[in-house]
Image (cartoon, helix red, strand yellow):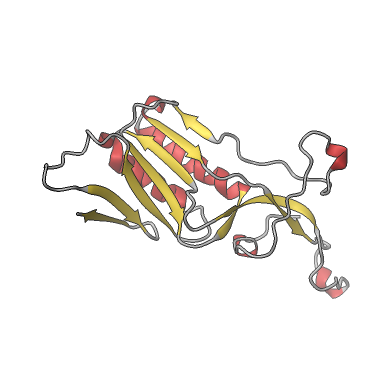
Amino acid sequence: MGLRPASVDRDYKGRPYTRTAKRVHKKNYIKGIPGSKINKFDTGKLNDEYDIEFLVYPDRDMQIRHNALEACRVSANGYLRKNITTQDFRLKIRVHPHNILRAHAQAAVAQADRFYDGMRKPFGKPAGRAARVKQKQAIFSVRSFKKYSNIVKEACKRASMKIPYSTKLVVTPLNKKVVDTPIKEKVVETTTVVDATVEENVKE
């Protein structure tokens, strides 16, 4: 059975299907659970000396399959490692694919619809995993230095193309001393990316 289109599983609806046993697998409520395709959740140098953080948020509640999350990580990590070293960034996937997706397997032969007629809305068997993400929940984050801001923005833009719905990018300074602010004014630097376009907003 091949991979179904992302539009089938991208909507945040229904109850989660996650009842599994962590220790004794014989007591699993769900049998035959596929493994997660995410290789690493934390990539780069685990360093707290970074001065800027890039967070990618969804514009609505959605489900993201584990293969899409892995594609985001591979896309962003490959671009960052090509342009800067691994010692200058930290990429972290902030959601976990706990929800188990079900699919009803049909005959995968030529002209199968002529002699195969399945039931309507079948329960199905486990076919994959997905993360249920709220609108105000970050999908992944990248920490780096301010001099690499343009490179990290491009990496986040490329990674967000793997997500089924549009996203926005929020930039947060981690060290307040980095931002040069006058005494009488308070400046917060925020950057929003909607549909892979960068817009810079400065609020007083």
Residue 19 position, x and y percent, is 77, 49
Name the residue located 18 percent from the left edge and 47 percent from the top edge. Answer: 186
Residue at left offset 33%, top offset 58%: 197
In the rendered structure, the answer to whether residue 10 lies left or right of residue 175 reads right
160 in relation to 76, above or below:
below
Q: Position of residue 189 (x, y in %)?
A: 25, 48
Q: Residue at x 22, y 55 (%)?
A: 203
The residue positioned farthest toward the front in the image shown? 184
* Quarter holding residue 64: bottom right
Left or right: residue 103 versus residue 183 is right
Q: Where, quadrant-wise, is the C terminus in this rendering?
A: bottom left
Number of numbered callouts drawn = 0
Q: Quadrant of the N terminus?
A: bottom right
43 or 47: nearer the eye?
Answer: 47
Q: Nearest the camera: 130 or 184?
A: 184
Rendered residue at 81%/60% (across/down): 124
Above or below for 180 versus 167: above
78 on left or right of 64: left
Q: Position of residue 54 (x, y in %)?
A: 37, 43
Q: Judge by depth and name the residue closer to the eye, 203 or 40.
A: 203
Residue 5: % across, % down: 63, 61
Q: Is residue 142 left or right of residue 65?
A: left
Query: Which sits in the foreground, 158 or 189?
Result: 189
Within the image, what quadrant is residue 27 found in?
top right
